[in-house]
Image (cartoon, grey):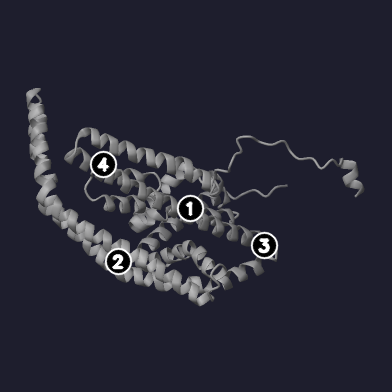
Amino acid sequence: MTPQKEPGKEGLKILLMLASAIIITAGLQAGKQVLLPIVLSGFLAIVSYPITTFFKNKLRFPHWLAVLFTVIMDFGVLVGLGYLAQYLGQDLAKTINAKYYPLLFEKVHEFRAFLIERDWNNLADQMLQEIPDILNSQRIVALSTGVMGQLASMLTFTTLILILMTFFLGEAPRFRANINKLGSNSDTGIRKFSKALEGVQKYLVIKTFISALTGLLAFLLCYYMGVDFPLLWGIVAFALNFIPTFGSIIAAIPPTLLALLLISPTAGIIVAGGYLLINTALGNCLEPMLLGRQFGIVTSMVLLSVIFWGWVWGPIGMLLAVPITMLVKLGLESSKDLAWIAQLVDNPPVSRFPLPPRHSGKTNENINKE
């Protein structure tokens, strides 16, 4: 006879799971200042490890020297992009007040006159009341100052991340050897964990390459169309491309508006179409071809994970939403009680041209004889 489950036990278990999820989420938010540098440095170490192995295997560097060169390269890229974005942001803040703000108000008044000519007076009056408050120059300056202050505080944050990343890269060979020792004991969980780390590494490396290519093409597009600050929009496209779906849309808005405002409506349409073409070719064609569907997460869960981790850890959480969700899914699969959650969001790869099952040519009788 199968054991009968006591009534109320399943409901109590679900309530405990929900309570635990709420407590864990609150802990993640409360420990953001401590946890975020650790998580980010771990993922940066995963991305940078192929560079370390290149220095070791191809250039015959000792391990400590390969780690040192890797950290110096990462430091140069992070700090260089940070200071470049800060400089361009300051220049953009000045240009907003001196050039864009008056020109935008001129366009708004022209559009208001267009509405009045067609007897849409109420809409025109409402527009005249709300637009000055939305486009308040003091508000824009305050926002720019706040962003620059955050960029300045990132220097200490970056230093801490690089220090942690140095230790992670230094211990990587020993960590890999320990995983191999555990894997020799035929532990399925260890094998899954090792495979998941390789998948995360592949995802981050390919995503970085695709993002860099996206930023380069966005820069060339804006430069060719004469949009102001093309280098800034290239950096923005590179950074936001790590955020699935939402990032590419957000990155296209500022250069499109600038093209509409400063050049012509046709130029704005061309810039928007160029961003759409870039993201379609790279994000929907090249990236899936390189990555495949190895993470096995449904698209809706990817979008929800971006929203959730953005709420918990801000923009950096959105950048790391997919690899974090993949590791969380792996942890759920390893649990007997929570494996059903992982199955709900599972999206296993399906071959377009399924092959017939391979037969060894042996019959059941031959197999039994052997």
Closer to the camera in the image, 108 or 83:
83
Mark 4: few/some/many CA within 10 Å (<14, 14-19, 20+): some
Q: Is residue 32 visible?
A: no
Q: Position of residue 77 (x, y in %)?
A: 36, 64
Q: Which residue is mark 3?
A: 187
Kindly report the distance in space between the C-alpha atoms of the residues bearing marks 3 and 2. 41 Å
Q: Are marks 3 and 2 in contact (CB under 8 Å)?
A: no
Closer to the camera in the image, 44 or 302:
44
Q: Are marks 1 and 4 in contact (CB under 8 Å)?
A: no
Q: Which residue is mark 4?
A: 225
Q: Which residue is mark 1?
A: 206
Q: Image point 22% across, 57% down: which residue? A: 88
Q: Earlier in the sequence, mark 4 or mark 3?
A: 3
Amino acid type at circle 4 is Met
> Is 98 left, or right, of 150 in this rendering?
left
Element under label 3? loop
On screen, residue 148 above or below 356: below
Q: Position of residue 121 (x, y in %)?
A: 7, 27
Kindly report the distance in space between the C-alpha atoms of the residues bearing marks 4 and 3. 57 Å
Element under label 2? helix
Mark 1: few/some/many CA within 10 Å (<14, 14-19, 20+): some
Q: Earlier in the sequence, mark 1 or mark 4?
A: 1
Element under label 1? helix
Closer to the camera in the image, 102 or 51:
51
**Farthest residue toward the right?**
369
> Is 350 left, or right, of 108 in this rendering?
right
Numbered disc in front, either 2 or 1: 1
Q: Which residue is mark 2?
A: 154
Q: Earlier in the sequence, mark 3 or mark 2?
A: 2
